[in-house]
Each structure stands twice: as structure tokens, then as C-alpha cells.
Amino acid sequence: MGQVMASLIIGSILIASIVTFQTKHIQPTWVAVAKYNLAAFPVMLVANTILFIAFTNGQKYFGSLPAVVGTQVGIYMLSLALLGAWWLKQPIGWHTLAGILLLAAGAWLISG
């Protein structure tokens, strides 16, 4: 279980970091974003590989694929909120925290 959670956290933080960095530093044009995505591809490949392994192995502990993925989505949203606050100076409001808590509650409900 610990390895699955660590994989969900690492994969989510890697993807959230790529998205947050892009939002801060890459111009929203087709060429700039395409170049960035090509450069970020190796990291995305590693992150998604980590997550896909965690999704498969996590079903043993969470009971179902939706429960594992729901947990990962909550971790990803929390990562985005924290990185947005840190890198983009975006405050974390109560709406964001409530949404993350609802995601966590949904993952818990799905796991039965």
C-alpha cells in the first residue's frame, strides 16, 4: 500500500509540476506549447508509467480502479493547488479545499 501511495504522489506531483511550469513560463501558442511538450515528454512518460503501475497494483488495496484513480485525482488537485500557490502566487481558497475534500470523500465512497 505504501508503494502504491508513493507512486500516486510522485506521478501526480511530476505531472502537476509540468503543467504549472508551463502555465508560468510557456507562451500559449501552438509552437511554444508543442516544443515544451516535446521537451517534457520524457518526464510525462516516466510519470504516467509510475501512475499506470500504481493503478494496476492499487486495485488490490483500494478495491477498484475508480477508487485508485479517484485518489490520484485528489492528490493531483492538491499538488496543483500547492504548486499554484508556490509558483504562481495563487491563493488557495476555501472552494479549492472543499473541492479537494469532496474528491477525497468520493474516492472513499467508491472504495466501499
Image: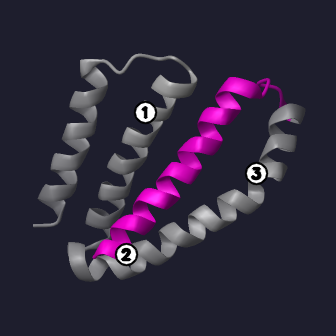
The amino acid on which the numbered mark 2 sits, given as a three-letter code, is Gln
**Left or right for 107, reference 10:** left
- The span picked out in magenta is 1-30
Measured Cα–Cα span from mark 1 to mark 2? 22 Å
Q: Position of residue 99 (x, y in %)?
A: 26, 32
Looking at the figure, which quarter contains the C terminus?
Answer: bottom left
Q: Quadrant of residue 34?
A: top right
Closer to the chain start, of discs 3 and 1, is 3
The amino acid on which the numbered mark 3 sits, given as a three-letter code, is Ala
Point 53% across, 70% down: residue: 50
The residue that disc 3 covers is 40
The disc at residue 82 is: 1
- State yes or no: residue 15 in magenta: yes
Secondary-structure class at tag 1: helix
Q: Quadrant of residue 35?
A: top right
Q: Position of residue 38 (x, y in %)?
A: 83, 51
Q: Position of residue 36 (x, y in %)?
A: 81, 42
The residue that disc 2 covers is 3
Point 27% across, 38% down: residue: 100
Does 53 sit above or below residue 12?
A: below
Front: mark 3 or 1: 1
Point 48% across, 53% down: residue: 12
Point 57% across, 50% down: residue: 15
